[in-house]
């Protein structure tokens, strides 16, 4: 079950997206009295989420398995299993998986946890975006475009590898 734009997340909410999927694993209030929501996010190989920010929540991402590529305020980071990154309020960010295996990330949201609190700057899936009006925002957009190019090159490289492999198998039977 996916969440409507203004709804509060509930444990068990899940959704499949072009980049992968998520399931809500926990909700409640933290020690400061703020809402929190935890999700397990699975990013498929060569998957990328939108470049976005949040006005009312911050996030912590911890890689449970695989390798995660992160853009955070114009910087590109690579996280391996067990590593984490904190996404501050209003930071421009995205996650991507450049590897050949799924990447599973535990996401902790703190603040107002709603789908409505997403400002998108670039979206690989055609959703509405707005302009990032800062030097960090511009650099984040540039980094995102580079990631998209790497993903496209990786996908075409995988297709070429598969074709080569099929030819090898075909020649083996001749």
Image: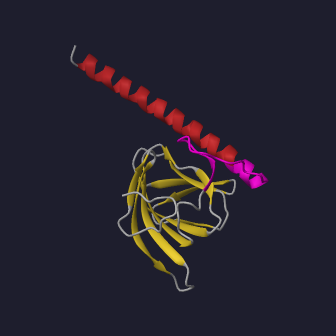
User: Where are the magenta residues, as a range?
Assistant: 119-140
Whether residue 131 is in magenta: the answer is yes
Quarter occupied by residue 161: top left
Quarter occupied by residue 170: top left
Q: Residue at x 78, y 52 (%)?
A: 135
Q: Number of callouts in the render?
A: 0
Q: Is residue 35 left or right of residue 76?
A: left
Q: Residue at x 51, y 82 (%)?
A: 30
Q: Position of residue 155 (x, y in %)?
A: 47, 34
Q: Quadrant of the N terminus?
A: bottom left
- Outermost residue toward the top in this view: 174
Q: Position of residue 127 (x, y in %)?
A: 56, 44
- Is residue 155 among the parts visible in the rendering? yes
Q: Position of residue 48 (x, y in %)?
A: 52, 47
Q: Residue at x 34, y 26 (%)?
A: 165
Q: Nearer the viewer, residue 133 or 40?
A: 133
Quarter occupied by residue 144: top right
**In the rendered image of this protein, does residue 21 appear above or below residue 158?**
below
**In the rendered image of this protein, does residue 170 appear above or below residue 64?**
above
Color style of the picture: secondary structure
Q: Quadrant of the C terminus?
A: top left
- Is residue 65 among the parts visible in the rendering? no
Q: Position of residue 16 (x, y in %)?
A: 39, 51
Q: Residue at x 57, y 40 (%)?
A: 148
Whether residue 147 is in magenta: the answer is no
**In the rendered image of this protein, does residue 55 appear above or below residue 111?**
above
Q: Is residue 57 left or right of residue 7?
A: right
């Amino acid at each position: 079950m996916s969440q409507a734009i203004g709804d509060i997340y509930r444990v068990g909410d899940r959704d499949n997206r072009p980049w992968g999927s998520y399931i809500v694993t926990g909700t409640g209030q933290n020690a400061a009295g703020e809402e929190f929501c935890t999700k397990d996010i699975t990013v498929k190989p060569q998957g990328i989420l939108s470049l976005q920010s949040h006005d009312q929540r911050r996030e912590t991402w911890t890689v449970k398995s695989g390798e995660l590529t992160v853009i955070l305020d114009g910087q590109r980071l690579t996280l391996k299993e067990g590593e984490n990154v904190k996404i501050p309020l209003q930071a421009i960010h995205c996650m991507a998986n450049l590897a050949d295996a799924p990447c599973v990330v535990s996401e902790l949201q703190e603040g107002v946890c709603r789908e409505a609190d997403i400002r998108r700057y670039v979206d690989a899936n055609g959703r509405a975006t707005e302009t990032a009006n800062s030097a960090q925002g511009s650099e984040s957009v540039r980094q995102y475009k580079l990631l998209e190019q790497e993903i496209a090159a990786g996908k075409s490289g995988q297709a070429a590898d598969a074709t080569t492999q099929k030819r090898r198998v075909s020649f083996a039977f001749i």
